[in-house]
Image (tube, helix red, strand yellow):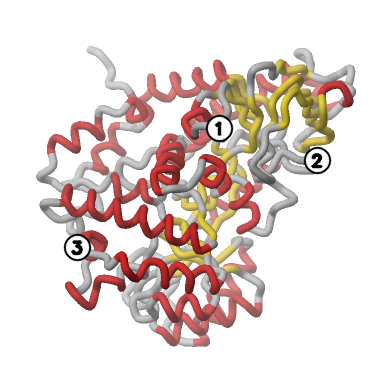
């Protein structure tokens, strides 16, 4: 609970500053913030709006326009945006949050929204508490417990027939989950029943393409998002048989264009999580493991978590083969080519990381995925869109987040360079606004320093 207490303290300090130090004043009037003389990157299209002013009241953007035409309210906290760029906060569209320690890492990296892909009651509680302003955390869209066949890979509901599908979908909708997460061992019968029930209840289905269903059937029946490019490995299976690492290293590129067109026609989106596979490490890869452990962001990961991530300890130890480096590198190249083929065909892409997996650090990994999308052939605008306006479009929440526009939730990043020239500039933050509350870069850095201090070994 230490991080939650820190989040409470940070939230309280920001409210006091916004109200001039008066708690009573903070309750009497909604906080007002004005970003003045800033270059706005609205992410509705590829453009930069130079020398604009953006006025935020409470948690929404109230007004924006050329600086000369926008009046700054007398009670506004003014943030000088000269030489800086204001863009929407980022969304990690494949997240696994089980620890409060994730929240300061996400906020410090400008991640203001997450799509949580394995949910439980704790996520519903966090979601309500964050909206109520009880502590600082990302806006959460969450699945319920993973739905799988028998035996399930992860704990959660097992569905083998239509009756079980009806009950499970109804229970997850009633609990308040935003969508359904399906997994690999569902039978065709169970999958079809889940999809039918989900359509009847207006709930989206996302997840792994079940082995018994296959990609073509999943695309034709209305899966909304495919995670990790699951199902596409069938392009190699006839030649070499199942097996993730080998399959991805041997995909048949000649089929990419046709399967990308089929995907685009179906309306399904993909969340490739390229960064996930780049951090798979085998027990024998001591040099690669050393490089992963030496990264600066590992300072913000607890020793217990690091131990659980080691290849001899983690849950992937039986699926990451020796000679993983050659398979990983070849698979990475082919995944990126498939991502570009999907993009070129007009299929939707989402920016996500699958953090919670070994060596995929919350927040930091999303910036690595931005670079992956650019390396795959997308422009900086196209890559950023997958984690801003594209994510909002996918969630049917374009009026809520993803763009800098009147009425949108004030989830914003102020940065020192033009992100449309280089996605690395998204990492050059001057501060982050989350639900209308401003966190300067010094506050964010202090939060990270506090986390690192708790996780560093105590000297004797």
Q: What numbered label is drawn on residue 246?
A: 3
Q: Position of residue 178 (x, y in %)?
A: 61, 61
Q: What numbered label is drawn on residue 406?
A: 2
Query: Could one spot residue 277 in this view of the protein?
Result: yes
Q: What crowding class fits label 3: few (fewer than 14 Cα within 10 Å), some (14-19), or many (20 or more)?
A: many
Q: What crowding class fits label 2: few (fewer than 14 Cα within 10 Å), some (14-19), or many (20 or more)?
A: some
Q: Position of residue 370 (x, y in %)?
A: 46, 41
For the residues carrying marks 1 and 2, which lies nearer the camera in this image? 1
Report how far apart the C-alphas of labels 1 and 2 lie in the structure: 21 Å
- N-terminal of the pair, mark 1 or mark 2, is 2
Residue drawn at (51%, 80%), measured in percent from left and top?
220
Q: Position of residue 378 (x, y in %)?
A: 48, 47
For the residues carrying marks 1 and 3, which lies nearer the camera in this image? 1
Q: Secondary structure at mark 2?
A: loop
Report how far apart the C-alphas of labels 1 and 3 lie in the structure: 36 Å
- N-terminal of the pair, mark 1 or mark 3, is 3
Residue drawn at (53%, 68%), measured in percent from left and top?
264
Q: Secondary structure at mark 1?
A: loop
Q: Secondary structure at mark 3?
A: helix
Q: What crowding class fits label 1: few (fewer than 14 Cα within 10 Å), some (14-19), or many (20 or more)?
A: many
Q: What numbered label is drawn on residue 118?
A: none
Residue drawn at (25%, 32%), measured in percent from left and top?
293
Identify the residue position indicated by label 1 in the image. 419
Question: Would residue 342 be found to the left or right of residue 266 on screen?
Answer: left
Report how far apart the C-alphas of labels 3 and 2 lie in the structure: 49 Å
**Quadrant showing the C terminus:** top left
Question: Would residue 439 be found to the left or right of residue 80 on screen?
Answer: left
Residue drawn at (52%, 72%), measured in percent from left and top?
223
- N-terminal of the pair, mark 3 or mark 2, is 3
């Amino acid at each position: 609970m230490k991080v939650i207490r820190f989040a409470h303290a940070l939230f309280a300090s920001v409210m006091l500053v916004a109200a001039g130090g008066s708690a009573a004043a903070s309750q009497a009037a909604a906080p007002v913030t004005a970003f003045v003389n800033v270059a706005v990157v609205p992410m509705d299209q590829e453009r930069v709006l130079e020398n604009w002013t953006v006025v935020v009241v409470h948690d929404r953007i109230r007004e924006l326009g050329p600086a000369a035409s926008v009046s700054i309210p007398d009670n506004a906290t003014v943030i000088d945006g000269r030489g800086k760029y204001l863009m929407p906060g980022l969304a990690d569209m494949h997240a696994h949050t089980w620890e409060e320690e994730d929240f300061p890492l996400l906020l410090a990296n400008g991640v203001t929204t997450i799509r949580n892909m394995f949910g439980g009651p704790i996520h519903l509680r966090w979601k309500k508490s964050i909206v109520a302003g009880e502590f600082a955390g990302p806006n959460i869209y969450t699945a319920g417990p993973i739905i799988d066949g028998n035996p399930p890979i992860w704990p959660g509901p097992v569905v083998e027939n239509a009756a079980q599908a009806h009950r499970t979908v109804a229970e997850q909708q009633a609990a308040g989950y935003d969508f359904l997460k399906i997994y690999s061992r569902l039978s065709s019968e169970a999958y079809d029943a889940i999809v039918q029930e989900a359509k009847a209840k207006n709930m989206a289905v996302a997840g792994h393409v079940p082995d018994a269903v296959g990609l073509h059937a999943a695309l034709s029946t209305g899966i909304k998002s495919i995670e990790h490019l699951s199902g596409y490995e069938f392009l190699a299976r006839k030649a070499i048989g199942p097996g993730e690492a080998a399959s991805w290293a041997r995909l048949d590129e000649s089929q990419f264009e046709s399967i990308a067109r089929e995907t685009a026609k179906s309306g399904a989106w993909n969340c490739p999580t390229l960064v996930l596979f780049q951090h798979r490490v085998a027990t024998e890869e001591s040099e690669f493991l050393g490089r992963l452990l030496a990264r600066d962001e590992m300072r913000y990961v607890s020793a217990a978590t690091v131990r659980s991530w080691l290849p001899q300890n983690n849950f992937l130890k039986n699926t990451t083969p020796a000679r993983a480096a050659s398979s990983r590198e070849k698979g990475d190249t082919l995944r990126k080519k498939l991502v570009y083929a999907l993009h070129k065909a007009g299929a939707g892409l989402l920016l996500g990381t699958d953090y919670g997996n070994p060596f995929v650090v919350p927040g930091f990994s999303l910036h690595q995925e931005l670079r992956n999308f650019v390396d795959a052939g997308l422009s900086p605008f196209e890559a950023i869109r997958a984690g801003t306006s594209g994510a909002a479009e996918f969630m049917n929440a374009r009026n809520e987040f993803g763009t800098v526009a009147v009425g949108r939730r004030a989830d914003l990043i102020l940065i020192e360079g033009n992100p449309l020239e280089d996605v690395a500039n998204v990492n050059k933050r001057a501060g982050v606004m989350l639900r209308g509350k401003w966190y300067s870069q010094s506050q964010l850095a202090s939060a990270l320093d506090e986390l690192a201090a708790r996780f560093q070994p105590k000297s004797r």
